[in-house]
Image: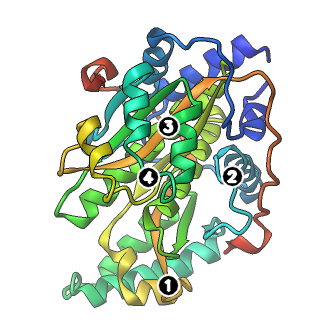
Amino acid sequence: MSATQQKSALSQLIRKRRSIRSFAKRDLSPELIVELLQAAEASVLSTDQEPSHRFLLLASPDGKAKAASIVMDAYSEQGLYKWLPNKLNQLMADRIAQIPAFLIAIAKDRGEKERERATVSAVLQSLTLLAWERGIGAVWNTESFMHKPSFKLGVGVQEDERIVTILYLGYCEKVPKTKPRTPAEKKLTYL
Amino acid sequence: MSILSLFREAREVRRFSDRPVSREVILSILEDAVWAPNHKLREPWRFIYAEGAAKIKLTDSVDASKHPRLVDTLTQAPVVLIVTSPVNPDERIDSDDFGAVCCLIQNIQLLGWAQGLGMAWELADYSACEELLALSGVRSDERIAGILGLGFFDSLPEKPAVAGLDDRLEIW
């Protein structure tokens, strides 16, 4: 691909990307996610040889089933499912089974909270673009259960770590319509 | 063909050439970059653009002994872009918005890189840099998500080794 082609391909990827919440019933290979994640990591401007973030990828039926029960424990801790636990349990397990892969991004708190969150966000944006190029959609999930002690314990998040987001990933079934964006020019001040 | 190689080769640029960067080039990058993911379409970013005399004023306002990297970037880069994110009392909204603005900054970096424009992304606690904040008009209900130095470059800087994922990725 020539430089001009790359530039216009990137511009198109960025503009056409949508957040995807419902996915095609098609497995996502963990190897592909890992390959794209490596390229995404290489694309960020971090000179940190010992990055303070790490990932947990849930992509197998067993891994997701385990995660489903951990999420239910977290909901239970939140007092969110006092009624019909069995039915809700099943709903949650079904919902989680429908999402092909979850990528949990975890940052260690080394006293530069914003720098660390910025790096993780940049990696995930690069990953999202590389995934989109292959017909794979993603959405950031920041529901409150991820900060519950029982969820953190269940997925092995340490005391000095924080979940930045859980990225849902899967092949797109249909791409939602776009809403217009505010032109950058309207948000720009020249000094 | 894929754009994987573009991503794999991207790197920080801290030394720039004299080739001028037009406002149109930066604006066209920003018009693409605002397609970053963001919650509820809040589009939580704001841009402050400095070059020439305004940029020199910003540079002079920062204590180089406290922020040497920032002063270096402000001095070297022909164009400086400050990108802000709103401060919100709701921790979740605050954090979601900050993440969205960082995604947008990553878009800026990649879009610039794709056309030979290098970037350095400065981010630290600048709350004590009162003069810088006043000069650039960053409000008390905003935080800086990045001070970006942008420019063309003559020689391609070496890419630092990328930390491996082996001990940072667990798969269930």
Left or right: residue A125 versus residue A140 is right
Residue A79, image x, y percentages: 21, 87
Of discs 3 and 4, which sits in the foreground?
4
Q: Secondary structure at mark 2?
A: helix
Residue corresponding to mark 1: A160
Q: For marks 4 and 1, give the one nearer the viewer.
A: 4
In this rendering, does residue A87 appear at all? yes
Mark 4 burial class by Cα count in 10 Å: few <14, some 14-19, many 20+: some
Q: Residue at x 44, y 73 (%)?
A: A93
Do residues under tags 2 and 1 come within 8 Å of each other at their CB atoms? no
> For mark 4, what is the residue?
B63
Real-space Cα separation, disc 3 to disc 4, in angstroms: 18 Å
Q: Earlier in the sequence, mark 3 or mark 4?
A: 4
Q: Which of these two is toward me, A111 or B109?
A: A111
Q: Residues within 10 Å of mark 1 (few under 14, many from 20)?
A: few
Secondary structure of the residue carrying tag 3 is: strand
Query: Of helix, strand and loop, which one carries label 4?
Result: loop
Question: Image check: A78 left or right of A40?
Answer: left
Q: Hey, what amino acid is under mark 2?
A: Glu
Image quadrant occupied by the C terminus of chain A:
top left
Q: Please check whether the numbered discs 2 and 3 fall on a single chain.
A: no
Name the mark on residue B148: 3
> Rounded to the nearest whole Å, what is the CA distance between mark 4 and mark 1?
31 Å
Chain to which mark 3 belongs: B
